[in-house]
Amino acid sequence: MQIVILAGGLGERITPLIGRRPKSLAPVNGRAFLDFQLDLLQRSGFTEVVLCLGHLGEQIREHLASRRDAGLKIQLSDDGEQLLGTAGAIRNANHLLADEFFLTYGDSYLPIDYRAVIDAFHRSRKLALMVVSRNRNQIDQSNVVVEGSVVRVYDKERRHPGMEYINHGVSVLHKEALRLVPRATPFSQEDFYQRLISEWQLAAYETPLRFYEIGSPVGLEEFRQLTAAGAIGA
């Protein structure tokens, strides 16, 4: 299995806590967050990782040079001087992508059954699948409306009737879906998903498990506490 990690964000919310470094390298009990993430993915059966770099990407390159990942092939794609947005960064990595691939964020830790997710994706016969959880505004504000097994609304700004779910931070895509992303221009993942939704091509997979993130001060502190206690990351 192949997974793309979007690791080019600015990380402005946690900069006061981690200094001048990318979110992926946020220190967590003596290790970089990226190490926890890569270890989880390898345990979950992934053999290939594509890291999309942007802000301070050279630090991630240097960090990876110090790792030894037997059985895990890591490739890098860099936006270059012009940041291309989350979907634009995926399109920019097109030459590295398998015909189908997972997608996640550089600040997310998602201990789920990835093989069950890919099986659901195959059954859906859609161009893409989003993992969701029935959140009901508990962990954060819900942002997804699901009808049957299809995502009908994904909106992080406005409220919609039936918005009980939240994007769990991981998706699966056919490479063919990237035809909806314009070439060499900034384009967001949200706009990309709106195009998939308009064509009824974004399936939904519900998980009861929660996700963890270190993109906010609260999330980073929680992750540090849980890993220190051995509750996650083992």
Image (cartoon, grey):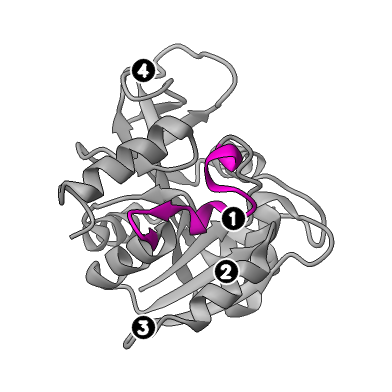
Is the N terminus in the top left, top right, bottom left or bottom right quadrant? bottom left
Amino acid type, residue under disc 3 in the picture: Asp
Q: Which residue is mark 3?
A: 69
Is the C terminus in the top left, top right, bottom left or bottom right quadrant? bottom left
Residues shaded magenta: 14-31
Left or right for 5, reference 43: right
- Sequence-wise, the earlier of marks 3 and 2 is 2
| Neighbourhood count class around disc 4 (C-alpha, 10 Å): few under 14, some 14–19, many 20 upward | few
| Element carrying mark 2 | helix
Q: CA distance from mark 3 to mark 1?
A: 21 Å
**What residue is drawn where x is 64% and y is 39%?**
12
- Sequence-wise, the earlier of marks 3 and 4 is 3
Q: Give the foreground label among 3 and 1.
A: 1
Q: Which residue is mark 1?
A: 22
Q: Give the foreground label among 4 and 2.
A: 2
Amino acid type, residue under disc 4 in the picture: Asn
Dots 1 and 4: beta carbons under 8 Å?
no
User: Is 127 drawn above or below residue 144 in the view shown?
Assistant: below
Q: CA distance from mark 4 to mark 2?
A: 34 Å
- Sequence-wise, the earlier of marks 4 and 2 is 2
Amino acid type, residue under disc 2 in the picture: Ile
| Element carrying mark 1 | loop
